Amino acid sequence: MRVPSTEVQNNFGKYLKFVEVNEEIIVTKNGRDIARILSCDYPNKSLVTEGVAEYQTREGRVSYEEFLELVEASEQRFELIDGVIYNLASPSYEHQYAVNEIHGTFYNWFKNNNCIPLTAPFDITLFKAEDNICIVQPDIIVICDRDKMDKKGKYQGVPTLVVEVLSPSTRSKDTLKKLELYKQCGIKEYWMVDPKNNLVHIYILDKKEITDSFAFQKGAHEYVESAYFKGLKVALTDMFL
């Protein structure tokens, strides 16, 4: 992002947070680029393959307002969970194959329905606490409160169902941090899809608790079936390579 030199001088700590998540800061003066601020290990960072990096910056937690400023000025994709920024990279073929198959089934099943499935990148804003606003991009969401879309096309509601497809680098975040986030914020059903083990865990969430869970594995089961949306099924042989 390009930032005037006086702004950098007055808010250096904030822009240092941005540098620490691999955002390049180009300092300008009188309309000219005069300097560049980079992370010290920037040349070793790679976003070519699927990955996610967690950044608890040395400057402290990142605020909701700082995060919005970062994403509006950056071409990278980020998530914000509990004041920590996660840098999202391009997914693998295996990951996208599963997303494509699940979304295809969802699209046909929800057609002419009040609910609609959408795929990432699409931000959802979740209020875990008054001072802890999180922004995430689940792989697939099912929105049933379509009236919560504002005039700018920004979604202000809570999805009914969320799907996350795991990868080696996102497993901890998706299985721990996001499960807790979705549990606290009113998601009704969470699908955790594990291509490595041909396995899907479904968690039923209510009143900030896990009220039930189910596991479906390719070879042992034919379909994954939603508990909340009765009749919604995805064939496991279609989902996994």
Image (tube, rainbow, N blue to C red):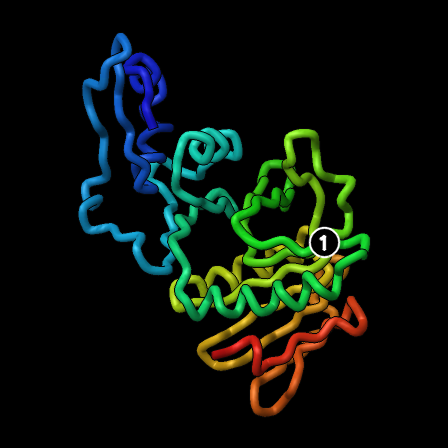
Q: In this view of the protein, which residue sits in the foreground, 82 or 92?
A: 92
Q: Is residue 213 above or below residue 88?
A: below
- Measured as percent of width and height from the top left, residue 168 is found at 39, 68
Q: How dense is the environment of label 1, judged by Cα within 10 Å: few (below 14), some, or many (20 and up)?
A: some
Q: Position of residue 161 (x, y in %)?
A: 69, 60
- Judge from the rendering whether residue 216 lies leftward or rightward of residue 35; answer left or right: right
| Residue wearing tag 1 | 116
Q: Amino acid at mark 1?
A: Ile
In this view, 175 is above or below 67: below
Q: Residue at x 55, y 71 (%)?
A: 193
Q: How many marks?
A: 1
Residue at 45 percent across and 35 percent down: it is 71
Q: Tell me the residue at 28%/15% (across/down).
A: 5
**Quarter of the figure with residue 222:** bottom right
- Relative height, residue 58 to residue 166 (above, below): above
- Badge 1 element: strand
Residue at point 22%, 44% (across, down): 42
Q: Decide which of 129, 54 is in the foreground and name it.
A: 54
